Image (spheres, rainbow, N blue to C red):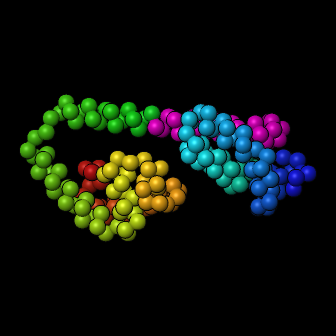
Amino acid sequence: MTHVSDAGLVLALARYRHEALAEVYRRHAGAVFGLAKRLLGDQARAEEVVQEVFLRLWNHPERFDPERGSLRSFLLAQAHSRSVDVLRSEAARRRREERDAQHHAESGYDLDRQVWDLALAEHVRTAMEKLHPGERAAVELAYFGGRTYREVAAELGEPEGTVKSRIRNGLKRLRAELTASGVSVGDV
């Protein structure tokens, strides 16, 4: 496939030819990674962006229009867009956490709320015990230990993608368990 044009490779992708994706990756992954890393300042997050960009191309090769520009430009635009989304999401999360912390500090803490929190904590403990051990460990480290995905992965000796999946699945199970026990998930 080394002699095929980018447009030809995209046509081969539409026919689910893995070697076409490998060739597109060989040609353009370095540039996509470089842009993502420059924007995000983090190798692991840049690698995730690269994976998402090429997965999107694999799943939707028809989105590339050779009349509008080169494949490299298309992939770089996708990487830029996804990197900006990641940065915005992180900024919004930080603002939300700061706002919640500020609100909690200003609102004080009364006895009724303390009793409710103790009851809620018991429900959460019971639901956590029902999670698979791998999910429970990942959720505990991330949410109760305040660790990042990367730190959880390093501590558990697992790939970051596996840890993310375990956390996501664990949170889904946790939500289902809490809902089944009559706890409004909005209260957690």
15 or 152: nearer the viewer: 152
- Position of residue 50 measured from the top left corner of the image (x, y, whole percent): 64, 46
Point out the image quarter for the N terminus: bottom right
Residue 78 is at least partly visible in this image: no
Q: Nearer the viewer, residue 95 or 155?
A: 155
Q: Which residue occupies 8% across, 44% down? A: 111
Query: In this rendering, is residue 59 above or below 89?
Result: below
**In the image, what residue occupies the spot 31% across and 51% down?**
144
Quarter-wise, where is residue 14 in the image? bottom right
Residue 18 in view: yes
Residue at image coords 88%, 52%:
2
Q: Could you say where residue 81 lies in the image, as x and y percent from the top left?
A: 62, 37
Residue 170, percent across and down?
39, 61
Residue 166 image-quadrant placement: bottom left
Residue extending furthest right? 3
Q: Nearer the viewer, residue 149 or 97?
A: 149
Report the magenta stretch's main SS.
helix
Asked whether 69 falls inside the magenta stretch, the response is yes
Q: Which residues are magenta?
A: 65-90
Task: Report whether 3 appears left or right of 132.
Answer: right
Left or right of 56, for residue 169: left
Along the horizontal axis of the image, is 138 left or right of 54? Answer: left
* Figure disc tally: 0
Which residue is farthest left? Answer: 111
Task: Give left or right: position of 21 versus 177.
Answer: right
- Residue drawn at point x = 38 percent, y = 52 percent: 142
In the image, residue 169 lies at what x, y percent? 43, 61
